[in-house]
Image (tube, rainbow, N blue to C red):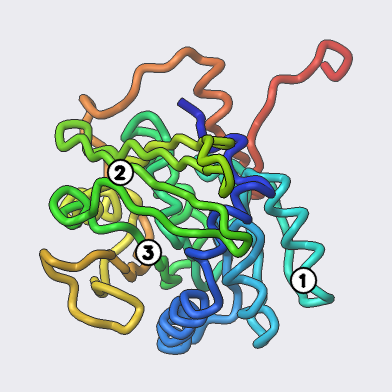
Amino acid sequence: MNWWADFFDEQYRVLWAPVLDDERTRWELDGVRELLERHDVHSVLDVCGGDGRIARPLAAEGYALTVADYSLSMLSHGRAQAQGDALSWVRADARRLPFAPRYDAVLNLFTSFGFFATDAEHQAAMDAMASSLRPGGVLIMDLVHRDFAATAVAPQTYYELADGTVVTRRFDFDPIEGRTHERLRVFDAASGVTVRERNWSIRLFTATELARMLERAGLRPLAWFGDYDGDDFCAESARLLLLAERTGTASARPEDEMPTMHWTTILDQLVCPQTRAPLRLLEAGEL
């Protein structure tokens, strides 16, 4: 179910360009910037930051940015667009971020949370973001509001690319799984034949579930917004923008929520306490 492993490529940038246009980017930047300024932030880690759509403008304003993403395509494109701005680009799995707890803020935007198969993996990602923050540092997450998705999102929409290519988007929500199942189809403008198709699935969490996950990760919610304008979060909000602060120690997880794993899988999830780098098995010649 690792659809995300090769999803974010050059084709993604083309297909999502009408969605992630300059107007939306400015809207998101204004909201993020206001929250950063409230909390005396200098160093920022953008988790699942892609090609730095948000990080590059922030770096140009003087913030010290690190972009972490699994997609080499997005990281390479972002690095080429950075034009000398002081950014660090790191390929990393969100469940195992290799960073020491030093950042003033961690960003996780445009529903870049919920990609994995299990809730235990999503908690691991939340824990990893919390562990990258200094005590008192803040996490800013922007997500689709689960309740809105369950009741108000149109099952099918369409838009056109700059060259007139028609793109349709099918949206289904499973209320038992709490997951979206989505499909993007690209049609040839002349023949109407499907030429490309993309499928993906995202676990959407309620605000109640997110509050529990934050607590387990040692994060204290400070504010819940319904959009980047700072409007109050409510049942009708299309988005959920949350602000949380790292308090220190993560809470213990109930025993029945602890996943059973083979020791080799557990090894993949361990990190060096000092550098946060993933541990690995030594080859025979290294022993």
Residue that extends furthest to the right in the rendered view of this protein: 285
10 Å crowding of disc 2: few (<14), some (14-19), many (20+): some
How far across and how far down the image is residue 78, in percent?
Answer: 72, 62
Q: Is residue 212 visible?
A: no
Q: Amino acid at mark 1?
A: Ala
Residue 204 against residue 46 in the figure, above or below: above
- What residue sits right under mark 2 in the picture? 171
Q: Residue at x 37, y 39 (%)?
A: 182
Q: Earlier in the sequence, mark 1 or mark 2?
A: 1
Q: Is residue 194 left or right of residue 253?
A: right
10 Å crowding of disc 1: few (<14), some (14-19), many (20+): some
- What residue sits right under mark 1 in the picture? 82
Which one is in front in this view, the residue at disc 3 or the one at disc 2? 2
Which one is in front in this view, the residue at disc 1 or the one at disc 2? 2
- What residue sits right under mark 3 in the picture? 142
Q: Earlier in the sequence, mark 3 or mark 1?
A: 1
How far across and how far down the image is residue 254, in percent?
Answer: 21, 33
Q: CA distance from mark 3 to mark 2?
A: 19 Å
